[in-house]
Amino acid sequence: MPSIFKERSKDAGSFARTGTLHLNGIQIETPIFMPVGTRGSIKSLSSADIDELGYNLILANTYHLYLKPGKEVLDHFHGLKKFMSYKRALLTDSGGFQVFSLASLFKFEEDGVRFQSHIDGSHHKFTPASVIDMQRSIGSDIMMVLDDCAPYGSDLGRLELALDRTHRWAKESYEYWMEKPNGQNVFPIVQGGVNESLRKRSLDTLQNIDFPGIAIGGLSVGEPRPEYIRILECMAPYFDQARPRYLMGVGTVVDILEGVKNGVDMFDCVLPTRNARNGQVFTSFGKLNLRNEIHRLADGPIDPECGCKVCTTYSLGYIRHLHKVKELTAFSLSTYHNLYFMQSFMEKMRKSIEIGNFQGFYDHWKNLFGS
Amino acid sequence: MPSIFKERSKDAGSFARTGTLHLNGIQIETPIFMPVGTRGSIKSLSSADIDELGYNLILANTYHLYLKPGKEVLDHFHGLKKFMSYKRALLTDSGGFQVFSLASLFKFEEDGVRFQSHIDGSHHKFTPASVIDMQRSIGSDIMMVLDDCAPYGSDLGRLELALDRTHRWAKESYEYWMEKPNGQNVFPIVQGGVNESLRKRSLDTLQNIDFPGIAIGGLSVGEPRPEYIRILECMAPYFDQARPRYLMGVGTVVDILEGVKNGVDMFDCVLPTRNARNGQVFTSFGKLNLRNEIHRLADGPIDPECGCKVCTTYSLGYIRHLHKVKELTAFSLSTYHNLYFMQSFMEKMRKSIEIGNFQGFYDHWKNLFGS
């Protein structure tokens, strides 16, 4: 496969790096944070907002889109991007993780996983090939393989079973994908829980297949942060330099800092959008709870150092009021701000790596968002 | 008082007219529809959206703003317009109607109405002077007097009591307002239920006071449409030509047509915004239910003849999907479209009056929205 990634600079004191991801003519600077548009919209925002915020790689969830609007609708509209009037790049998960976390019932079989919809209890089955097909209908630039993500706390037997299944399905996915790549990419998913030797084995096995990138699954699933860091550290020296590394479902400002420090290039998480709807916003001086009584008469913006249209237009006191009375506008204004923050945070992080100050950047933000 | 209204053209075959409302340097073409921003935001939209839609007169509800964020906050922020970063004109009701329709308990007294908040049961009292004071804190360009809006179906005794109270309070309001007009206007409210002689008496009494405009209350409160039309018709010949007439809480496309036909200049209603959130949009070919199965594969816009950014960007099929999965974005896109529709509908109506084709306009839209 021709490489889709080019490393641009490396931090001297860690595995942090910057690079460029090339996806069907779209260039994406890494490390990057991808906002989550689960069912074809970033909650409360429009596709025009995503463009305005400057995001050129977003995530959508295959499990949700498979159930609604479904494959037929997505085929009819020539994929999710056209359906939602979004013109940049798209990454989708395989749907596996949502089956394990959302579906009302699921059962592994040799060739896939059976499950019942969390919406109506209807019966379905995902296989490595079927989720590739679904992601072909979605039209994502980066697709994910079906994997087995064992829950945090699983014993060694369960973790090894998950690894074997994940690796076997990854090979099947690779072959199935290669029959008709069609400009789409596929990443396999490293598993192994918090077991270092399984993680290394998984990384080694999957990097031996010619996938254009590599994803890390099964982290940020409930393990304490020291465990999370230990596993990132155990993999960092072994990543293939030529391929982008994507840490799935991560995360908080601090978790992203740890990820980048350990060589990760791509992140996604619902946290900035979900927290915004719950009244928590991110600022240059840390997290802020919009509903707090202390902000009742706050004339200034959420963050005086933020240049987003919410901060340059509305006062913290007004947005607090909207949250207190549960106005829908509270959700969109807060979401917009948090996604602007994340975009700006990642941009500053890339710059810090390029000018050789990643450690300073890391210390500054870890101190502000550490708790 | 210097007049705030100038009639511009009159329909030959009805009482329909166009005019210009002058409010603190802002010129508003009438007939106008005002969207409702109950608690300081048009639900799901931002103040920037209101500007973009071209609305220069909107409504907010005194009852809601009195409870939250409350007078102290509005005073601190120098009024609602600054609080919500909205720069055009603002009209507020007196809060009376919400007391009668929302408050958990209320009781008339000689000098006002006592009530308990529908939020927390706390005790409050509104008087003619106190609601003017509250609207001074809100900083509306047009304030309303406290009135007694007897429910539809009230007997003659109750209607007469309401009329006396409404007129007495209107005079008190006028005097209290005149002590410190401060660029704000006050409109009294014509009552009288569906009784023609009471309506005429109320109109006559209130027009004898030097208010800058006149509002009509107690219509569109449950009466059948023929009753609604009969009452509008009985008042139409008696309106003072020099003052703007505002029909409160109206309404549907057809109710607005009947209002304009009978000389009304100003309307407000939550219907276009509330219906949008429930999946009903207005189009050049009538009402449309976005959730309908028939739109599942609809590639075209909600309304091919609509020039709004929603119709020029997103397909009906996509917006249907967002409604079906209850995405927040469904609410903002549909609300934006409906408010664009109302703005465009009123603009075309003004034009029809000016070119002498109001009857043709009336027939066309009544036919499309008549049911």
Image: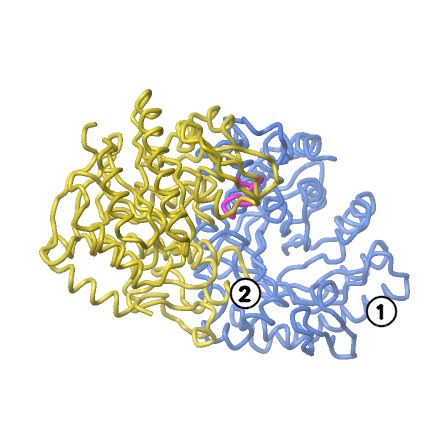
Chain colours: A yellow, B blue
Judge by depth and name the residue closer to the eye, B23 or A2. A2
Residue A190 in percent (x, y) is at 30, 43
Residue A128 in percent (x, y) is at 41, 31
Identity of the residue drawn at 48% across and 24% down: A76
Residue B352 in percent (x, y) is at 60, 35
Helix or strand or loop: what does disc 1 sit on?
A: helix
Magenta segment: does it hold B41?
A: no
The C terminus of chain B appears in which quarter of the rendering?
A: top right
Q: Which residue is mark 2?
A: B140
Chain for disc number 1: B
- Circle 1: is it few (<14), some (14-19), or many (20+) Cα within 10 Å? some
Residue type at numbered disc 2: Ser
Please give left or right for residue A38 compared with residue B267 in the image: left
Magenta region, residue range: B322-330
With respect to residue A268, does B189 lie above or below?
below
Q: Quadrant of the rendered structure where residue A203 is?
A: top left
Q: Quadrant of the rendered structure where residue B64 is?
A: bottom right
Residue type at numbered disc 1: Leu
What predominant SS class does the magenta segment belong to? helix
The mark found on residue A73 in the picture is none
The mark found on residue B161 in the picture is 1
Farthest residue, direction top:
A179
With respect to residue B158, does B51 lie above or below?
above
Judge by depth and name the residue closer to the eye, B221 or A250. A250
Judge by depth and name the residue closer to the eye, B202 or B300. B300
Helix or strand or loop: what does disc 2 sit on?
A: loop
Chain for disc number 2: B
The N terminus of chain B appears in which quarter of the rendering?
A: bottom right
Please give left or right for residue B90 compared with residue A366 in the image: right
Judge by depth and name the residue closer to the eye, A331 or A274. A274
Q: Identify the mark nearer the N-term, 1 or 2.
A: 2
